[in-house]
Image (cartoon, rainbow, N blue to C red):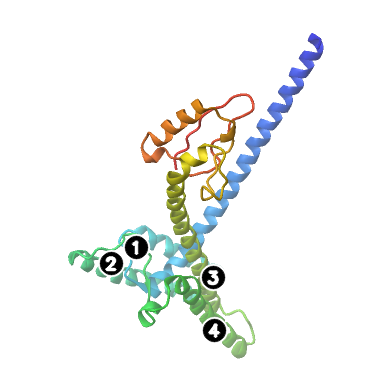
Amino acid sequence: MSANNNDKFESGYGVMYQGAKEGHQYGTEAIAVLVFVYRTLQGLVNLYAYPWLIILRHDFGERFLSGWVLFFCSMVMAVVSTFMGSGFGYLVAASLPFFWAVHKKQIKKRNKQGIAWHSKNNGVSRINQVFPNLSYSRVDQVLEPLLLAGSGFVLVALGYLIQGTVHNSFGLVMVLGGICLHLHHGDNYRKHRDLLLDQIDSQIVSENFAEALKGDSTAYQTDGFVVQGADQWTDKERQLITEAVLGESAEHVPNDSNVLSPSNHERSIVIVTP
């Protein structure tokens, strides 16, 4: 290849590389924006769900029921009430300090008695008081939101029969509250499920890492944990990575089955901590 052609090749390669780099950067930024929007919406949903939790539940954790939660809940409820033109929403917002004070008194009494209780518990539904055999998942994600939203639908229907219009802000505020409760509990379920799966994955990795590192075992023999490209490694490389991972503390053991992948030109050892 001539020097001129070589320069053209390097120039073209540089343009493609820069374009790929910028495309990756823009893609990452777009994802970051979407994640920010999602988290913002989820935060607003949670703030609108909290007032109904404070009213419908008891036995909260000390850190869950903070003064900042009370302030932002009242603000969100007031904004929604203004948007819907609902005096009922203002009544709910005004009643929150009373319920908050009652719950804080209960928490203080529990602490004096030395009763252990998770500080971030989001309360126990009163439905579980009446029906203690019902599972928390069913109550949290189905029955409690359905009770609140259903009551709102009934009020909307009554407003239509009496006034001839479906615009019943009293009922709509409750319907929106039921929807937000369902989304809030669903988000909590996913978070706790992720924590459980992280623990299970860590256990699987600790039990099957050495076997998966051999590169000749199937995913069914190692509980689904696979070290990508392990069959291409030398015995020395396997020894190094085994010492690096299993010879160190448990926090260095990766929980992702795809974090180890040698390239065609060089093999590098990457340890990803959870």
| Residue 255 percent coordinates (x, y) | 47, 44
| Residue 9 percent coordinates (x, y) | 77, 18
Say which residue label 1 marks. Answer: 65
Say which residue label 3 marks. Answer: 179
| Residue 160 percent coordinates (x, y) | 62, 86
Asked whether 214 or 101 is in front, the reply is 214
Taking the spot 42% from the left edge, 49% from the top edge, the residue there is: 203
Would residue 180 be found to the left or right of residue 51 on screen? right
* Picture quadrant where residue 93 is located: bottom left
- Asked if the residue under mark 1 is in contact with the one under mark 2, i.e. CB atoms within 8 Å, the reply is yes
Whether residue 6 is situated above or below residue 36 in the rendered picture:
above
Q: Is residue 95 visible?
A: no
Q: Distance from label 3 to label 4 (Cα)? A: 16 Å
Q: Residues within 10 Å of mark 2 (few under 14, many from 20)?
A: some
Question: Callout 3, which amino acid?
Answer: Ile
* Picture quadrant where residue 54 is located: bottom left
Asked whether 64 or 200 is in front, the reply is 200
Question: Callout 1, which amino acid?
Answer: Leu
Which mark is first along the chain, 2 or 4?
2
Would residue 124 be found to the left or right of residue 142 on screen? left
| Residue 190 percent coordinates (x, y) | 49, 59
Q: Quadrant of the N terminus?
A: top right
Say which residue label 4 marks. Answer: 155
Q: Distance from label 2 to label 1 (Cα)? A: 8 Å
Report helix, strand or loop for mark 3.
helix
Q: Distance from label 3 to label 1 (Cα)? A: 21 Å
Which mark is first along the chain, 4 or 1?
1
